[in-house]
Structures are given as C-alpha cells and as structure tokens.
Amino acid sequence: MIDGAAALVVCAVLWSTGGIFIKNIEWTGLAIAGIRSLISGSFMLLVTRQGLHFFVRDKKGHVDKTSSLFFWIAAISYALTMILFVAANKLTTSANAILLQYTCPIYIILLAPLLTGEKNLPSDYITVLGVMLGIILFFADGLESGNQLGNILAALSGLSYALATIFMRRCRGNSGGAMVLSHLITAIVCLPFVIQSGAPSPKSAFFLMMVGIFSIGIPSILYTVGIKKVRALTASFITMLEPLLNPVWVIIFAGEVPSVKTILGGCLILGFIMIRSVVQNRK
C-alpha cells in the first residue's frame, strides 16, 4: 500500500508539469480548465471503477447525511479552487495568484481544529510562518500589485483549497468520489468557454490529453490516497512542492536560471517543512 506522504509528493510533482503543457494549448484558461477536468474526471472513473457518486452511504446502504454534506463541500471547494485560480491568473500576475493560493495553510491552521478536531502543534505555527516567508521570497521577483479583483479571486482560491483539503478528510473515505464530482462541476461550469473556443488543433488536443491525464488525472487519484493518511496541514505543506518545481521545469525546457531569491525561498520552504517533519516524528 502506498504511503500517504509519498503519494502526495508524486502528486505535487505531476501537478507541477501542468504549466509546461498549458503553454502549448491555444485556448483560454477557463476552456482549458473545463476540458482538463472532463478528461481527468473520466480518467479517474475508468481507472478506479468506482462510478460517479452523489451521496455517501453507510455500511447498510443508507445515505449518511453528514458525510454527504462534507462530500459536497469538498467537491464544490476543489472545483472552486480550479476555477478561481484560472480566473485569477487572467486578471493578476502568476506570482500573485500562486502566492495567494498557497496561503491555504493559514486557513487550515485556523479552521482544521474546529472542523476536523486535528490539533495544531507549536511546530505547525512556526512552520507556517517560515513557509509564508519562503513563498514571499520565492516569488519576490515576480510580485506586482496586479489587478485587485484578480488578487481577491486568488485569495479566495486559497480559502477554497483549504476547505477542500479539510473536508476531503471528513467524507468517510470517499475523497476519490468527491474529487471526481469536483471535476464534473468544473467541466459543467466551464462548458460555455469550451464551446466558444471551438475545436482544438492537433497540437492543442495532444497537450489537453497530457494535462488532463498526467497533470491532473493521475495526481487526483494520488491526492485522494494521500489525504486519507496524513493531516490536512501536512498535506498542504507537501503539495507546496508544486510551485517549487516549476522553476526546475523552466530550467530544463526553457533554459531560464532562477534568481538567488527564488532559490533561497525554495530552500527556506523545504527546510521548514523537513524540520517540522523531524520534530513531529521524534515526538
């Protein structure tokens, strides 16, 4: 059985490849988000063979109203995360969008004890402060004031990402079904933009399949495995590998060397997460 942390690490690595593929797709952001979710949701249904669910049932087959509510909150929250982030990217800078989305650990620190009963440790608070400082340093060269609406949408995507992470743990092991449902919701919401974009070129169609399967589909399955086995806050820290790996792909495929601030920020983020892991494992 795959370890929860390992599943989330591989998930983050695959998530980080999305930017490379999206650059080769000649469509608007929301149209890409819609088809990407349609492909990834279909892929998850095909691989997991669990079918599309709209409710959570107990062992006797009765609808569990509480777990079903959490199930829908998780699905809607993750769908909102995908849609808000794409919309924010169109209105503000990419650095602002990523920075504001990855404020999600702050929301988890505040909300998880109330919503999941997972208690925060002193090392959690120290790690959040260190990670936020690292993220600011990491994206310092690209930070701009940006469009205010775009910044607000990006901040809301951070909140929705936190809620998705929290409630994925509250729907009685049905996080996979919630993830599939979130992709269905995203595909339906973005359908008008897909229709408006028309038929994709062969090149765009190829990269749509790549981003749908390898950047979202497989990672979605891994995320649902990992989120069952680690705390919500731990999951949010591990998946921060996604923005950290983006400069690596830029170096490999575009030959652009990141700045000293970017390297120091990345080291700071990874350092605090690793120290937290060591401290908590010793305890």
Image (tube, rainbow, N blue to C red):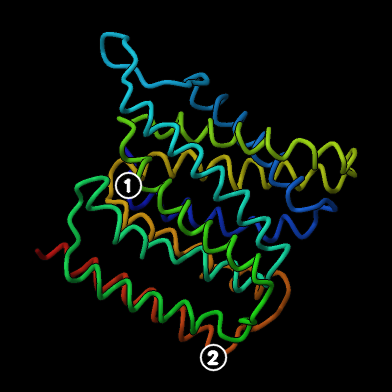
Quadrant of res 250? bottom right
Q: Residue at x 55, y 31 (%)?
A: 44
Quick check: 231 left or right of 92? left
In the rendered structure, which amino acid carries the disc numbered 1? Gly
Residue ID for mark 2:
260
Q: Position of residue 109 (x, y in %)?
A: 29, 61
In the rendered structure, which amino acid carries the disc numbered 2? Val
Local SS, label 1: helix
**In-front residue for pair 259/140:** 140
**In-front residue for pair 150/36:** 150
Q: Position of residue 244 (x, y in %)?
A: 51, 70
Q: Residue at x 46, y 28 (%)?
A: 177
Residue ID for mark 1:
4
The crowd level at tag 2 (other Cα within 10 Å; few <14, some 14-19, many 20+) is few
Mark 2 vs mark 1: which is more N-terminal?
Answer: 1
Quadrant of res 18? bottom right
Quadrant of res 159? bottom left
Q: Position of residue 23 (x, y in %)?
A: 76, 60
